[in-house]
Amino acid sequence: MKFSLVIPVAPERNAPIIDSLRKVDYEKKDLQVIVIRGRNPSENRNKGVLKSKGEIIGFLDDDAIVDINILKNVERFFKKYPDIDIVGGPQLTPFEDKYFARISGYALSSKFGAWKLSSRYSQKNVNLDADETALTSANLFCKKFVFKKINFDTKLFPGEDPKFIEDAKKEGFKVAYSPNIKVYHKRRPTIKSLSKQIFNYGKTRPLKESFINTLKKPFFLVPSLFVIYLFMLIIMFGLRLIDYKFSQLFLVPLLLYILLIIIFTFVDSIRNKDYKAIFILPFVYVLIHISYGIGMISSYIKNEIPKS
């Protein structure tokens, strides 16, 4: 058997991806679909691996829509690059998503909105040395022997997929990103659900790795530093702790941030051919950056800065 597809599902949820998988252009006799129910997605995936019979194990989210050629594209990729052990691709925003969800997708696929993580949500160039910034467990394919050395960390959610990719690279496995291996994944449809999602991403970063390791990837710290800066700004101006001569200098980072918001709002609206987005995108950028920053800060405060 060529493929085993593992789909973790919470007990109360359905798995609409099954309908999508029925339409995949691939011999069904060479395809095994494994649905594992439980509260812990990492445990579900690890249990799915134990039940797998395929040479390649794929991980997909229960509510994703897969591209009809996804398995053929995975097979072609591994044939073209036989040294690669793990490959994944983007989770794109479905065309039928509600409007706020589509705007969220624009922001997440933007360099300004998500920096390096934008590769997860848009089609970039092939990368034969990919890392956690490009891949997620919503669309990930591994050669079976990978699991002789590593598994998903059951203590993490979210954040278990970045940890899995990092562990794989530490073990010497070669990881790649391909834009042709794609799925479509619904975005959060409300301000509350999006802010909660991004907050949880920020909260998980200190649990996944030590502060020293995060310093090696400083872009993850930028949202937290920005939140601290805004807090200081409010305190200083509110209590008039800074004189007028220095106040203008202290406002420079905020003004630069606003300028970047204006520039990228127009760039991303044009890129997505949605000119009404200029009225919503600025707020979504701010929501993403502040939610991630507050999440990370709250995690450091609660758990203290992890030692290396």
Image: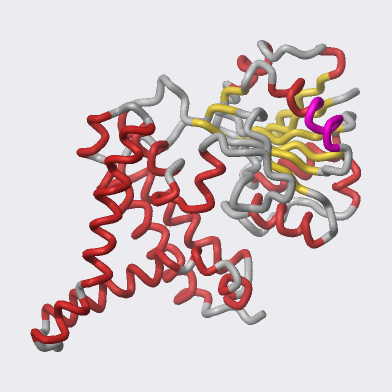
Place residue 182 in its image quadrant.
Answer: top right
Q: Residue drawn 56% across and 74% down?
A: 215
Total number of numbered labels?
0
Q: The N terminus appears in which quarter of the rendering? A: top right
| Magenta region, residue range | 75-81
Q: The C terminus appears in which quarter of the rendering? A: bottom right
Q: Nearer the viewer, residue 132 or 98?
A: 132
Q: Nearer the viewer, residue 137 or 82?
A: 82
Question: Where residue 198 appears, x then y in whole percent?
Answer: 43, 52
Question: Where residue 159 appears, x then y in whole percent?
Answer: 60, 54
Q: Residue drawn 39% across and 37% down?
A: 106
**Display colour scheme:** secondary structure
Question: Is 307 on the left-hand or right-hand side of 258?
Answer: right
Question: Where residue 10 appears, x then y in whole percent?
Answer: 59, 37
Q: Residue drawn 86% across and 18% down?
A: 30
Observer able to see residue 8 = no
Observer able to see residue 97 = yes
Q: Nearer the viewer, residue 300 or 84?
A: 84
Place residue 250 in its image quadrant.
Answer: bottom left
As displayed, is residue 56 above or below residue 113?
A: above
As displayed, is residue 225 above or below residue 125?
A: below
Q: Residue drawn 24% across and 49% down?
A: 262
Question: Where residue 258 appears, x then y in whole percent?
Answer: 24, 58
Question: Is 263 on the left-hand or right-hand side of 135?
Answer: left
In the image, residue 293 lies in the stretch drawn in magenta: no
